[in-house]
Amino acid sequence: MQHSKLWMVSAALAVTAAYASAATYPAWQEGTTYAVGTIVSYNGHDYQALIAHTAYVGAGWNPAVTAGSLWKDLGVDTGSATPTPAPTPAPTPKPTPAPTPAPTPAPTPKPTPAPTPAPTPSASCNYVVWTAGVNYPLGTIVKYTPNGLYYLEKAVGTNGSDATNPTISTYYWAQTTCGSATPTPTPSGGLPAHVVGGYWPRWLSDQVRVANVNTNYNVIYLFAATPVGGQPGSTGAVEWIAPENATAAANLVADIATVRAQGRKVILSIGGANENVTFETRARSQAFVNSIISIYSQLGGFDGIDWDNYEASDNPNTSEMVWIGQQLKARWPGFIITSAPAPWSAVDQTFCQQLLQGNALDYCAPQYYDGPNLADPSYVQSNIATWMTLLGPSHVVVGFGVNPGVTNYMSIGQATSTWNAIKAAYPATLGVFDWQIDTDYAQGWPFANQMKPLVNP
């Protein structure tokens, strides 16, 4: 009878062990504090904590939402927790002296070194310096300069973090650690005194690399980020698709860093023909801001954005675009915002004026090409007067298309003489741009080489 009981106990232990070997990682739970490296299961996936944090109740701070900032997605739950130690570590045995080897003539073997435990991952993260007035997206880590501490946004309102101070609002923010912190690169700061710009379209198969663009161009527009889901955008977010030229694509991040180190500015254009994105709601505007933050990290930083987000009958959502510009300028001091409107459009003229009045624009650059009579020098000189009156010469850049022999484009001689006439009438005019850099490159850089000394002698 005693043997029967022992058999039953052994069987129960075997069953328990079998179930234990098939158990998943502990389920993620709100209200729990997680250490770096902790693994949990959530909605059929396993996640590993990237930093120490507390999953505050009601914050909605689950691993799926905060993957990449708080948690690393390890993939579909395998159904086995074998690779991870049990939650309660076994007690560390007291060290015991090594046994004295038997006295034999054999040489004493070298002692086997004790295994070195795997290091605990350090708390590291990417962060941005907190700026007053900016609404940060969920999961953003900021550094609060006055006290040098880091805070993680754990909840959002209608406007992201609602611009709250991380030391005051415990609803939106929680203090966190950021051991080997890496700051997000920041814009190199402010407009050049005079602009000689050019557009660099991403779709050309035979494209000059950004680093090889003539150094007389001090503003390079990357053309262009386009709405996710196509016009007018599914959420308000935009995306940057890699250039079609493989060499240009492979070297783009390094090339951007190179030209920025030279003091030149790289500006991300938004939209373009048939790529309009609209901002009917604050939620769409916030999604756009979040996507710009993402592209900023993707490209290793840039210096501003250029609104090409309206054309023909498309009317800009001016008030929301003012808000967007204010958010970006607050987040990155020195961030440049430009626009390339249709010269004749009263709607575009009002848009640029209101953005400038809202501190959400640095300059507008009307496009005098690619349309009937737009490249006529007499029209350019007449029409530019309207823009000078609306914005002031220091906020106006003149947009040329130099491609001789192509309808509605200028020769370089026409462009330089037109610029000289404008500069004589409005000496404080900020500068010029050319559409497109690759055409200038193919022609031997006439625009870059001849315009630069005229714009900035």
Image (cartoon, helix red, strand yellow):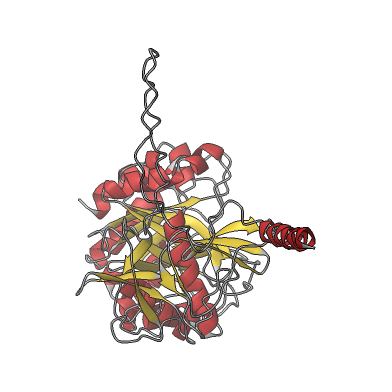
Write the residue at 66% across / 56% down: 80
Q: How many labels does the image show?
A: 0
Write the residue at 51% across / 37% down: 247
The answer to whether residue 147 is above or below residue 2 is: below
Write the residue at 30% across / 45% down: 216
| Residue 59 coordinates in the image, percent (x, y) | 50, 82
The answer to whether residue 402 is above or below residue 11 is: above
- When asked about the image quadrant of residue 362, the answer is bottom left
| Residue 39 coordinates in the image, percent (x, y) | 54, 61
Q: Give left or right: position of 47 versus 333.
A: right
| Residue 63 coordinates in the image, percent (x, y) | 55, 69
Q: Nearer the viewer, residue 218 or 388?
A: 218
Q: Give left or right: position of 151 versus 200.
A: left
| Residue 82 visible in the displayed image | yes
Q: In which quarter of the image is the N terminus?
A: bottom right
Q: Which of 120 and 282 is in front in this view?
A: 120
| Residue 376 visible in the displayed image | no
Q: Give left or right: position of 256 versus 226.
A: left
The answer to whether residue 97 is above or below residue 373 is: above
| Residue 391 coordinates in the image, percent (x, y) | 32, 77
* Residue found at the far top of this picture: 105
Q: Nearer the viewer, residue 419 or 77?
A: 77
Q: Give left or right: position of 241 versus 351.
A: right
Write the residue at 26% across / 71% down: 149
